[in-house]
Structures are given as structure tokens and as C-alpha cells.
Image (tube, rainbow, N blue to C red):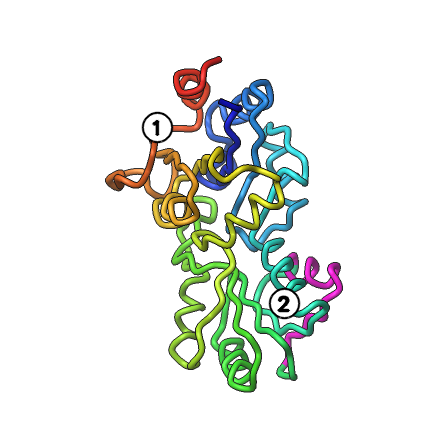
């Protein structure tokens, strides 16, 4: 069979906080040697594609910008397809605003007519933004959240995630919020199209049962759970194809499954 291709989550799989997972950089090199394509897929909204690449480089990984697909890019792709150049009210950090502006969209932070309300993670969210978002959605703007993860890790501190903001807006509007990132099946489909991978030949490597494994299963991908992050102690569901203690064990597993 052809060499498998991989989607690989980043935080909790390739690094934790400010340290790389043991042997992580060498595993990426191993995949290159095997001719197995990979795309790093992440729900982070607080770092741009370039900032993620720079962080990984600083941790010893050799990856290019086009080998990283953050949910922020998926959100831009969605807006481009649905609206073309759009005016958007944004809740999120500066890197998200910069990305949308660079791709031709007008980003506003004040209450004025917009096509969409974009919700990305921000360190200190406040209800004033949710209050504005509610009125804009009721006036016709589409509510779009990059994901609904309940928490996120921040250098050893677990903080409330974008899911809390999504829930706050959901209870005061009458239409559903469009979710972009993992575990939404269309995120994986968009990643397949971007990478040129074949669905049946692609394996999702992740540390979250809810985001990575459940999402991959719903999208028709195979899945491999590593126990170095969010789901370190949770029971393995029958829908998950494989598990490893860490991505460090991937070369041995790969050779067993697919030959050297």
C-alpha cells in the first residue's frame, strides 16, 4: 500500500508548554524519510501560521509554513467562499485580526453593520464583546466561532477556552453558531483538500479524544491517540484505531504497521 499520510495535532503532541515532546523533532524527520506526507492541524487561534512555525523551529522542528494548517486559515477560507471580501466584527487576538485584514477583509471592533461575527480565543474575553455580538447577530450577521474547546493550556495553567464564549453567545441568540475547527468534519475535509491527501489513507494523530479522535472518526479518517496531552488518562474508545504513549513511539509503530 502507499505510504500513509498524517494530520498531526501540535499542542500536547509535538510540544507541551515551552518544551518539545521527547523525540518529537526526530519523528518528523522519520516521516520525511518514509515519504509520508503530513500536515500539522491545530485549533489554536492566538498564533499565526508564521508564529507557530517560528515556535516549532525554536523547539528543534524542521517544518515549513505550508505544512501548518491552523483553524484561523480555515476560517478565512470559509469567509472567502461564503462572502468574498467581508466586513467582520471580531473577538480575538491581534494575529487573527491581522490575518483577516491581509486576506482582504475589513475587521471592526465596534458596533456597526457586518456580514459576520468572528469569535477566536482571547486571553481576557469580556461580556461587552458578547453583548455587541448578540445585537449584530440579531441584525443578521452570521455568528462564526473558530472552535468550541472548553479549556486551553497556557504554560502549565489551564484557562477557560473559546467554548465558554460560544456558550455565552448561544444562550442569547436564536440561530446556530457556525463552528470551523476540530472536531467539525468540514475542517478535516478542508485540510485534505489543502494537503492533497487521500481520505482513506490519512491518519489523525492527536491527544484529545473529543477534538482529534472523534473528529477524525466523523470525517472518515483513521486515528491514533497519544497520551501526552488532554486525554492522557481517559479510556480509549472503540472508534480509535491505535494509541501510543507518545509520538516518540511512532517510528516503531509505523514499521510494524507499514514496513520500514
Q: Residue at x 39, y 58 (%)?
A: 150
Tag 1: Cα neighbours inside 10 Å, few (<14), some, or many (≥20)?
Answer: few
Q: Identify the mark nearer the N-term, 2 or 1.
A: 2
Does residue 209 appear to the left or right of 39 in the view shown? Answer: left
How far from the left and from the top, in percent, is residue 30? 55, 20
How far from the left and from the top, in percent, is residue 253? 40, 20
> Along the line of sight, which residue is nearer the eye, 71 or 62?
71
Q: Residue at x 51, y 59 (%)?
A: 180
CA separation in Å, label 2 and label 1:
41 Å
Q: Which residues are magenta?
A: 95-110
How far from the left and from the top, in percent, is residue 106? 72, 71
The residue where tag 2 is placed is: 82
Tag 2: Cα neighbours inside 10 Å, few (<14), some, or many (≥20)?
Answer: few
Extreme residue in the front direction? 1
- Labels 2, 1: front one: 2
> Which SS class for mark 2?
helix
The residue where tag 1 is placed is: 245
Magenta-colored stretch includes residue 121? no
How far from the left and from the top, in percent, is residue 174? 42, 81
Amino acid at each position: 500500500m502507499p505510504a500513509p499520510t498524517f494530520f498531526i495535532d501540535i499542542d500536547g503532541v509535538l510540544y507541551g508548554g515551552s518544551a518539545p515532546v521527547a523525540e518529537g523533532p526526530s519523528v518528523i524527520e522519520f516521516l520525511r524519510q518514509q515519504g509520508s506526507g503530513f500536515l500539522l492541524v491545530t485549533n489554536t487561534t492566538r498564533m499565526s501560521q508564521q508564529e507557530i512555525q517560528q515556535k516549532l523551529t525554536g523547539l528543534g522542528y524542521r517544518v515549513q509554513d505550508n505544512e501548518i494548517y491552523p483553524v484561523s486559515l480555515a476560517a478565512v477560507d470559509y469567509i472567502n467562499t461564503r462572502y468574498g471580501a467581508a466586513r467582520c466584527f471580531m473577538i480575538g487576538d491581534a494575529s487573527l485580526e491581522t490575518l483577516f485584514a491581509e486576506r482582504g477583509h475589513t475587521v471592526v471592533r465596534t458596533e456597526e453593520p457586518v456580514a459576520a461575527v468572528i469569535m477566536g480565543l482571547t486571553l481576557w474575553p469580556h461580556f461587552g464583546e458578547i453583548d455587541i455580538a448578540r445585537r449584530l447577530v440579531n441584525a443578521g450577521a452570521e455568528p462564526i466561532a473558530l472552535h468550541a474547546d472548553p479549556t486551553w493550556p497556557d504554560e502549565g495553567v489551564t484557562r477557560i477556552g473559546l467554548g465558554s464564549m460560544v456558550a455565552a453567545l448561544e444562550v442569547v441568540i436564536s440561530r446556530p453558531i457556525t463552528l470551523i475547527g476540530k472536531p467539525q468534519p468540514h475542517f478535516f475535509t478542508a485540510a485534505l483538500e489543502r494537503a492533497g491527501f487521500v481520505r482513506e489513507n490519512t491518519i489523525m494523530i492527536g491527544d484529545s479524544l473529543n477534538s482529534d479522535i472523534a473528529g477524525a472518526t466523523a470525517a472518515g479518517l483513521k486515528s491514533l491517540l497519544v497520551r501526552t496531552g488532554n486525554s492522557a488518562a481517559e479510556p480509549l474508545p472503540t472508534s480509535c484505531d491505535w494509541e501510543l504513549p507518545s509520538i516518540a513511539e511512532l517510528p516503531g509503530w509505523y514499521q510494524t504497521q507499514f514496513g520500514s
